Image (cartoon, helix red, strand yellow):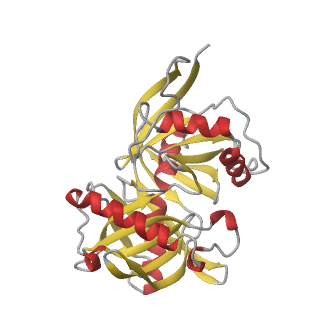
Amino acid sequence: MRERYATIDYHTAGEPFRIVPELGIPIEGADVASKRVFAMASPAIDRVRQLLCFEPRGHADMYGGFIVEPNDDGAHLGVLFWHKDGFSTACGHGTIALGVWAIESGLVAAETSGTTDVIIDVPSGRVTARVHTDPDGTVTGADFINVPGYVLARQVPVSTSRGTVLADLTFAGAIYAQVDASTIGLSIEPEDVSEIIAFGREVKWLLNDSPHAQHPNDERLSGVYGTILFSDHSADGVVRQRNATVFADGELDRSPCGSGTCARVATLTEQGALPVGSELVHDSIVGSRFLARVVAEGVEAGRRATTTQVSGMAYKTGEHVFEVDPRDEMTPGFVLR
């Protein structure tokens, strides 16, 4: 029999998310973080990731997740996020897509109040997709409420091919290095995509193994997941930025990046540029938008921490049943970047 994998695909602000409700391969682990470690070490599971992410079934910027059991009955589901290079610890745009899918599929019943919290266990902790519906049950929007984010290091000098730049490193489910695009002569526009990707990869690998990218409590969360290049367009009291997030090894987020937006909120709050209670208007390189604000403050690992809510929407793009022909010599596929 041919291998068959059923998926439901969504996009959140332009970024794809391929949901795999049933993998058909046991994923062991006491919690979702442990399941991620197991999946990373499993050739069989990793092969399915490649099948669904690589060409010809996917592409170099594909993103998705395997649905797994949550840590306990306090959550509706767990998920292992994946991309072309492996398994990530966090994904805000994916969390929004999962929340919308959970309501639209009937996995979670919509509350009559019009607001339903879908609780999801991810490798970096427990997050919430707060899904909004109108009186007839149609989903109208969703909020991603992340784990607390906090700054790890500020204004770190990095010697790059474009000269020395200053990077802020912040944890928000994953660790992001953030660089002002204007300091290297780039604009957050599609025409600069190739240079943005090249620079984002360069910064990631220069900082990835540095002490600045070490998570204070969990080594599994260490390393730079993404580089955020941003430009500021604030005016008339509105904090507005445009960003391009280059994550994994050269993937460019089409959305404003959910967990990356949380990292920017934590950084801007620490800098005093985003007063608590204010909203960050966060635009992507394709012009899609998230709105973000701090909903709680506290202390994590001895640092000021902010819990961020990111508001957006996800839309279903299709359902697929992918097959693997045993004669196909290009299994599990390929990527060109």
Q: Residue 104 or 246: which is nearer the viewer?
A: 246
Tell whether 252 sits left or right of 192: right
Q: Is residue 122 left or right of residue 63?
A: right
Spot occupied by residue 38 in the image (x, y as percentages of width and height): 72, 47
Q: Which of the pair 231/277 is nearer the observer?
A: 231
Query: Residue 227, can we see it?
Result: yes
Q: Residue at x 67, y 79 (%)?
A: 301
Where's the N terminus, which quadrant?
A: top right
User: Is residue 46 placed above or below 150 in the rendered structure?
Assistant: above
Q: Residue at x 50, y 67 (%)?
A: 308
**Left or right of residue 85: residue 301:** right
The residue most toward the right is 30
Residue 107 seen: no
Nearer to me, 236 or 326: 326
Name the spot of residue 166 as percent of width and height, x first.
40, 83
Q: Quadrant of residue 68?
A: top right
Q: Residue furthest top?
A: 1
x then y, percent, for residue 75:
68, 49
Total marks placed: 0
Side of 68 where 317 appears, left or right: left
Image coordinates of residue 119 in percent, x first then y, are 62, 50
**Residue at the extreme left of the image, as rendered:** 191
